[in-house]
Amino acid sequence: MRIVVNILAALAMGSLIGCTDIFPSDISKKTVELFAPGDRVEVKPGEVIFSWNPVDGATAYEILLVRPSFDDPKLLLMDSTVSIARFSVTMSADSCQWCVRASNGAYKTGYTCRSIVVKD
C-alpha cells in the first residue's frame, strides 16, 4: 500500500512541475528591452535588422513599424508576429518608428518603441 501512495505522490508532483506549460507566466509587468538599432540612429537604406532581448516566459513578439511616427502615422509598414527576438526588413529613406511587445497566449507586455532615420 505504501508503494502505491508513493507512486501517486510522485505522479502528482510531476504534474505540478509541468504546469508552466499549461498556465503561461504573467509577463504583463515585464518590459521588452530593445537592442538595435539604437534610438534616433541613422541607418542606410537596405536591409535593417531589428533586435531585442528575449523576455522570459514570452512565446511571441508583436512588431509594429510605421512612417514617420505613431504620433502622426502616415504608413503602416509592418504589423507582424514573430517567435524570435529579431526581424529584418528592407527600408527606403525616411523616418520611422518601431515598437515591440511580448506575448504568451494569456499575457502581453506593453509596447517598447524607438525611432530611426533611414538616410542615404
Image (spheres, grey):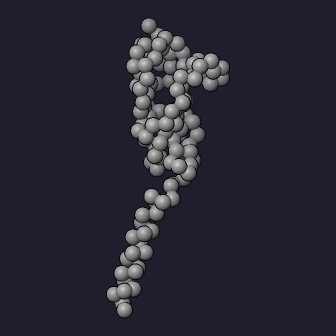
The picture places residue 55, in percent across and down from the top left corner, at 46, 44
Residue at image position (51%, 59%) is 23
Residue 13: quarter of image: bottom left
Q: Position of residue 17 (x, y in %)?
A: 42, 66
Q: Is residue 53 visible?
A: no
Total marks in image: 0
Residue closest to the eye, 25 or 74: 74
In the picture as drawn, the residue positioned furthest to the bottom comes out as 1
Residue found farthest to the left:
3
Seen in the picture, residue 51 relative to 71 is either above or below; the reply is: below
Residue 68, image quadrant: top right
Residue at the limit of the structure toward the top, as seen here? 120
Residue at 52% of width from left, 36% of height from top?
62
Report whether residue 89 is seen.
yes
Q: Quadrant of the C terminus?
A: top left
Q: Residue at x 56, y 51 (%)?
A: 106
Asked if residue 10 lies left or right of residue 39, the reply is left
- Please provide percent x and percent y for residue 42: 46, 15
On the rendered structure, is 75 left or right of 57?
Answer: right
- x then y, percent, for residue 11: 39, 75
Q: Which residue occupies 36% across, 90% down?
A: 2
Q: Quadrant of the N terminus?
A: bottom left
